[in-house]
Image (tube, grey):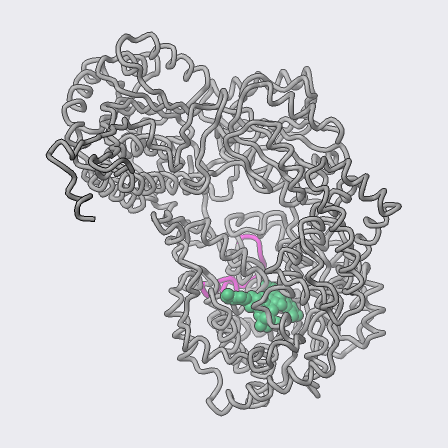
Amino acid sequence: MPVQSHDEWTIIRAMTDLTPEAATPVSWDALDLAKYRDEEEAAAALLAARPLTPDQRGIVKNEALLLVRRARELGRRGLVQSFLAEFSLSTQEGLALMGLAEALLRTPDTESRDRLIVEKIGAADWSAHLGQSGNLFVNASIWGLMLTGKWVEADLSEDGARLVGRVAARLGEPAVRAAITAAIRIMSEEFVLGRTIGQALARAAREDLLCSFDMLGEGARTVADAERYELAYSGAIRAVGAANSPGVGPENAHGISVKLSALSPRYEATQVLRVWRELYPRLLRLAQLAAAADMNLTLDAEETDRLVLSLKIMDRLAHEPSLGAWRGLGLAVQAYQKRAPQVIADLERLARRSGRRLMVRLVKGAYWDSEIKRAQMAGRPDYPVYTTKPATDLSYLVSARALVAAHPYLYAQFATHNAYSLAAAREMAKAAGVNVEFQRLHGMGEALYRAADLGSLRLRTYAPVGLHEDLMPYLVRRLLENGANTSFVHSLLDKAVPAERVVDDPFRSVELAGGRHPRIPRPRDLYGAWRNSGGIDLSIVSERDRLTAAFRDLPSPVPVPEASPDQIDAAFAQARKAQPGWDRAGGAARAQILNAMAQRLEENGPRLMAMLVREAGKTWPDAISELREAADFCRYYAMLAEKNFQGAALLNGPTGETNALEMHGRGVFACISPWNFPLSIFTGQIAAALAAGNAVLAKPAEQTPAIAAEAVRLFHRAGLAPELLHLLPGRGESVGATLIAHPLLNGVAFTGGTETAQAINRRLAARGGAILPLIAETGGLNAMFVDTTAQREQLIDDVMLSAFGSAGQRCSALRLLFLPRETAEATIESLKGAMDAAVLGDPADFATDVGPVIDQPAKTALEKHLAWLGREAKICHRMTAATPMPLLFAPSLAEISLNQIPDREVFGPILHVIRYPQEGLEQAAAALATKGYGLTLGIHSRLENFARRIRALVPAGNIYVNRSIIGAVVGVQPFGGEGLSGTGPKAGGPLALSRYAVERAISVNIAAQGGDPALFNL
Ligand SMILES: Cc1cc2nc3c(=O)[nH]c(=O)nc-3n(C[C@H](O)[C@H](O)[C@H](O)COP(=O)(O)OP(=O)(O)OC[C@H]3O[C@@H](n4cnc5c(N)ncnc54)[C@H](O)[C@@H]3O)c2cc1C
């Protein structure tokens, strides 16, 4: 497989008319080095930067106090703030309101809307809030919520539909629904200036606002989405340009804010070609329009993984000759990122180099919680953002000073609703004699800025424009910001909080508390009892280069010969001899070896991942996950070995005797693993058997012996005696069958097809002698049930990943998607668009989402099933390959009826869709349940009651709600099925080792020695 060129600048140069000097950028990739900077060190650097002198600190503090007091005199809380002041997000009621706001307006059918209202309102206690709010509307609403909640509370155990009917009947009419929908709509509209740009411009004129308009919408999932958003942006730029007074310049005219994620379904660092071929031209067209209108166009800041890519895009835009002498190009910079001050410095250099003044909006950042989660899930070395609010505030000040100092190359725009940040930025600008701009979000910060009286400094309002369907992600961010206890706006107008506490000097707080939040452990320390595996960040170019080099340097594969019957005999004999010593060594000694293995896996990560790409056709993200899972298995089972296999556990009993339970290995285990996880399942089975005190004979899949051989080599290098682990490659019919029949065998761990597991089971049963345990993980007929409250973008992402990720070759993969009739058509259309935006091709290319299937027989089986679907059902859509390769099978979407649910797992990227009417949900679920599988089950709904119903109807070992159904994490989502899908115990779960072990209870009568001294000595 050829490795594609990842040199973005070669691509850019080939596609651009920039001069060679302009097209040779400073290396933005250097910024990646600071992405995961140690937090204590980063916080210390912030303190050392001293953005304010001690005198200035005093001035700023006083000024900020004054602002708070004045704002409290002047200010009235807006409706949303009043609501969220009353129902903070730390309360159940606040969460219920946010959940309702997030889902209600986009739910199309009244029945589900009613269910949402019943569930969310009924789950909270509104009476405690009665009369607490100064806002009349809020108090009236609490009455309404409470009354509804009371009725609902009494009946929550009932079936949802009947319950809704009764509640509505008692209120006379669906008046509740209408009232609550209207209230949520009013709340949403507080944050939106207008539904159309025309309305928004008219309102801005009426209220004398200087605006940066934001056309609601982000996260395009399809090219059609991106085209729609481009149209909205270009229409807005034209309208704003026409409304602006000519000749005033971008500082004094309305501008526009653009989210790059809206302009492409693949705004990702690894999608190099698409970013430059599709996203960039779209953005350039918008920038040309903005330049012609001489207005500000600012790129909003999004997730940290996109920072460097956005800077590369800025770099190229700044050098575009077609933009003439335009001074309106801008970028938002997030202060919560550890590299914020460095970004400002680099932007200043870019402005100097390109000769184009840039506008820079300094924000703190709106995605903090999701950044923390992503870093934890991905096993990052640290967080890309600060974990304490004061560090973010201090970073804002350090960045602000750099921004002011970069005048006139950078035009400073300070976006904040925080009195201290505002006062500090104003003080810095005053000291430097620089004219700067402040910005606030529409619906927030009015009182503060009225109190601030900016004089000659400009105030710009960030003004979202659009319809409800595009509002949700924005609305949720605003609700989080307004409702979070740490947020400044949350406490600004709350007179119960003393002004001194509202205005916190971040220097002092950082000095006192140091850099790191005590309750947010580093991602690698997340689990406490075992270490989280480390991931590789593919958004970083040097990391991609490291993997490319490992792939290039792989030696040519050498054939791995099949183990002979003599070799199998010898392996059994050696293993049998060595096992008792290994068992006696105890859990702690075995844990040491397993932890050492985890370490070896990570040290050899790039090479192992490259092998996974080459031998198993894994994409890089899949290879990373697989390596991490292998390391997690080793560490988790090491932890269990130490906990449960280190000597005897004493049990309670009568005096005069001791009772204890010991766990021991069974003897020699055969571990038979599949090709779809040739490293993680292979390693996981072995690690479990070893941890419990067994010796292991491992038979890898025929298709992937090289990676297995490498894993065994690493086990031995980690200190495991070779006698305890033998690699026995070969076919199931020969090596597998010999292992199962061998007289020295004591147990089998198997992962693979249901039929093979049944065959092994029969052979084991036919043996004479001891009854041997079989731990089998087999396939599933995995489904996802969706209702009309599901969030579309999230659903599309999760379906794409679950059905087509790893080319559908996971036992957990999604095979059946149950869609409600009301939204099925729209969902299918979105899925088709997302399939067109995904890349099918060479797995060694970082841009590839779906690689080949494992071999020709697998491809032939899929083609056969697809032909059947073509004849008997309806094939809705297929992906097309970016680069032709022999084993690529185009992921396919097919619609079937309920009676066409396959009886067996079809192992590959074919997703079957079934539409169901709401009243037919039970029937649909029953049709699936009767097939007898029980592995993974997905549910996409904002209704807990819907999730409960599905869980009761469909058996499954692993249930995933509002997320993908693949990627179980060791120790977090123990994995394994029931029914036809496996025997248990679950891999990566607390009971995983039990079937690999025997238990011995030892009871000793101490009284037999003459008495129980302990009793006498009480
Ligand atoms: C005009 C305007 C434009 C904006 N554009 C963008 C944009 O393009 N991209 C974007 O991401 N955001 C953007 N924002 C949103 C902005 O990030 C938030 O409004 C901002 O974080 C609130 O900061 P504050 O100073 O008003 O409030 P404060 O209450 O002082 O700060 C709140 C912020 O602190 C951070 N924080 C909270 N807890 C912690 C913690 N434990 N550790 C570390 N940090 C923490 C969070 O980022 C949170 O948003 C914009 C805001 C405005 C006003």
Q: Residue at x 66, y 61 (%)?
A: 479
Instruction: Give the quarter of the image for residue 482.
Output: bottom right
Which of the two residues, 636 or 117, is positioned nearer the viewer here?
117
x, y (%) of residue 77?
73, 72
x, y (%) of residue 988?
39, 36
x, y (%) of residue 925?
65, 26
Query: Is residue 534 visible from the viewing direction of this image?
Result: yes
x, y (%) of residue 766?
33, 7
Residue found at the very far left of the displayed protein: 1009
Instruction: Give the quarter of the image for residue 295.
Output: bottom right
State yes or no: residue 19 in magenta. yes
State yes or no: residue 981 in magenta. no
Residue found at the very far front of the displayed protein: 1016
Which of the two residues, 617 or 127, is positioned nearer the viewer here?
127
Q: Which residues are magenta?
A: 14-27
Query: Left or right: where does residue 589 sit relative to residue 477?
Result: left
Query: Left or right: where does residue 990 sit relative to residue 890?
Result: left
Q: Quadrant of the N terminus?
A: top left
Query: Is residue 283 visible from the viewing direction of this image?
Result: no
Query: Left or right: where does residue 542 sit relative to residue 782?
Result: left
Q: Residue at x 88, y 46 (%)?
A: 172
- For ligand 1, the image quadrant comes to bottom right
Residue found at the very far right of the displayed protein: 172
